[in-house]
């Protein structure tokens, strides 16, 4: 069955430190991969997406993600986090033939001052 | 630019009551969808629509109805509320061109409690 796993429920990072959020997927077809961010009390906003081509994709707010087919992973990274990055981050997977995304359970990012 | 507007923001229902969650978008998006968000479970698709007059079921459709009479509006109806429907509900829309690759635009959610 198709699934998305975000192994870390919470991650705490000091302001200015680097960040990596993990996402692993199980999907039969070539996946479309997404990272969304949800600020408290808000809806979700797209950070970045991967369909094909260069496996390192750049997104908004200084985030990037790398697709590794051999590891079925699409980890999100940022070199230096800011207090405003505190939010919940969701990884999602889909395929071109339908409109149904499969979502991970989310990782809550906490920033230490 | 309003984007995706959901009303109400909060709602408390008693078991067995019915209600409609409203969703409207002003971006002329063909695709609209309803998700529920529960702690530790991410988002689960309830129903979706790829255009006026066309709706389809998602992963968790039981207990919910939808209709799409206009491009702009996509209301979600709870027929007989149950405590298991306590959740945060999100409406999302996108252009249909590009299929699942088109970015979803989300509303700010409706927090529903069923007692």
Image (cartoon, helix red, strand yellow):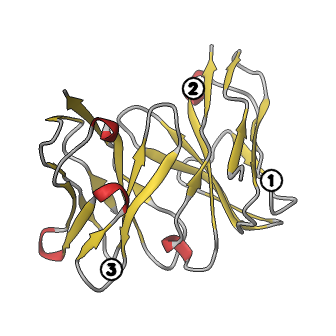
Image location (x, y in percent) of residue B42: 40, 43
Q: Please give the chain letter of the residue carrying mark 1.
A: B
Q: In x, y percent, where is residue A96? A: 47, 79
Q: Nearer the viewer, mark 3 or mark 1?
A: 1
Parent chain of label 2: B
Label 2 and label 3 in one chain: no
Q: Mark 1 highlights which residue?
A: B73
The quarter of the rendered structure image containing the C terminus of chain A is: top left
B12 lies above or below B50: above
Q: For numbered disc 2, what is the local secondary structure? A: loop
Find the residue positioned furthest to the bottom. Answer: A53
Q: Chain of mark 3?
A: A
Percent across and percent down for residue B102 are 53, 71
Number of other residues with Cα within 10 Å of mark 2, as a class: few under 14, some 14 to 19, many 20 or more: some
Secondary structure of the residue carrying numbered label 3: loop
Relative depth, front residue between A105 and A17: A17
- For the N terminus of chain A, the image quarter is bottom left
């Amino acid at each position: 069955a198709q699934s998305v796993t975000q192994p870390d429920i919470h991650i705490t990072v000091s302001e200015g430190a680097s960040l990596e959020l993990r996402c692993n997927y199980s999907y039969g077809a070539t996946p479309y991969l997404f990272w969304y961010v949800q600020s408290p009390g808000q809806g979700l906003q797209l950070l970045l997406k991967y369909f094909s081509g260069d496996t390192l994709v750049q997104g908004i707010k200084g985030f990037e993600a790398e697709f590794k087919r051999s590891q079925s992973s699409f980890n999100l990274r940022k070199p230096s986090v800011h207090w405003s990055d505190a939010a919940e981050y969701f990884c999602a997977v889909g395929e071109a033939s339908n409109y149904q995304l499969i979502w991970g359970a989310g990782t809550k990012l906490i920033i230490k001052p | 630019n309003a984007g995706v507007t959901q009303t109400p923001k909060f709602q408390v229902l008693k078991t067995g009551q019915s209600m409609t969650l409203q969703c409207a978008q002003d971006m002329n998006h063909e695709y609209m969808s309803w998700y529920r968000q529960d702690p530790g479970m991410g988002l689960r698709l309830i129903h979706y629509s790829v255009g006026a007059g066309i709706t389809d079921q998602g992963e968790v459709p039981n207990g919910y109805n939808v209709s799409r009479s206009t491009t702009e509006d996509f209301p979600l109806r709870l027929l007989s509320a149950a405590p298991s429907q306590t959740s945060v509900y999100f409406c999302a829309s996108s252009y249909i061109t590009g299929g699942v690759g088109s970015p979803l635009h989300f509303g700010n959610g409706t927090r529903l409690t069923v007692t």
